[in-house]
Image: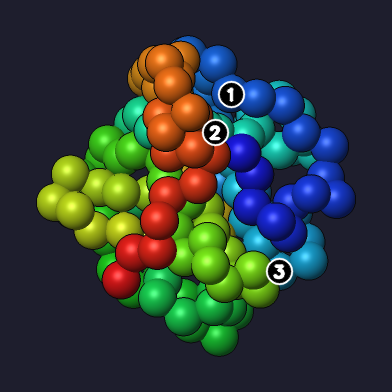
Amino acid sequence: MCDYSLHHAKSRPAAVDDKLIVQNFGRGTSGFCSPSDTFTAVCLLPGTEIAFDAPPAYREAFDFVIFPADKTASTATARFRQINTDNLSTHHDALEFGTGEFVLLTNIKQGSQATVLQLPAAPRNEAEAKAQTRLETVG
């Protein structure tokens, strides 16, 4: 899925082995896209596993212009999640790194490169389908 603020953008689902970069799509959010098509958001399902070229830099504050990336993720691999879904007016797309640390995708440094390693298994029941749609509130 793509975050609520990317619903205005052209998008497509992710596939295994997709090469991705973090791109600012305007309207205050960043997301993934293909290096060869920076106008199309690549949407990941919750549970999708990705590997960055190196542990990505990120910021805790909202704006890179005011607050540059000042932290680095603990690992280069992450699982895509959606968090804080009970709050409709905030970003939900997040990455869960191996140590359990959650970072909003929109806070990852633009230009960070990743590869899709694995998509989540197809849901076998309604509860699994719901889990792939939205993750419960974290934090």
| Residue of label 1 | 14
Residue at image x 65%, y 25%? Answer: 13
Which residue lies under the disc numbered 3? Answer: 28
Q: Marks 3/2: CA distance?
A: 19 Å
As drawn, 133 above or below 120: below
**Label 3 or label 1, whichever comes before in sequence order:** 1
Q: Position of residue 137 (x, y in %)?
A: 40, 63
Q: Quadrant of residue 5?
A: bottom right
Badge nearest the viewer, 3 or 2: 2
Can you identify the residue that label 2 sits on?
Answer: 44
The residue at the far bottom in this view is: 66
Q: Are marks 2 and 1 in contact (CB under 8 Å)?
A: yes
Percent position of residue 10, x then y: 84, 37
Identify which amino acid the numbered label 3 is placed on. Answer: Gly
Q: Which mark is residue 39?
A: none
The quadrant of the image that shows the N terminus is top right
Q: Which quadrant holds residue 104?
A: bottom left
Q: Quadrant of the C terminus?
A: bottom left
Against 56, is 47 above or below? above
Sequence-wise, the earlier of marks 3 and 2 is 3
For the residue pair 128 and 50, the one nearer the viewer reads as 128
Residue at image location 72% in from the left, 26% down from the top? 12
Secondary structure at badge 2 equals loop
Q: Are marks 3 and 1 in contact (CB under 8 Å)?
A: no
Way the structure is coloured: rainbow
Residue at the image point whose x is 50% and y is 47% from the top: 134
Badge 1 local density, few (<14 within 10 Å), some, or many (20+)?
Answer: many
* Callout 3 crowding tier (Cα within 10 Å): few <14, some 14–19, many ≥20: few
Mark 3, secondary structure of its residue = loop
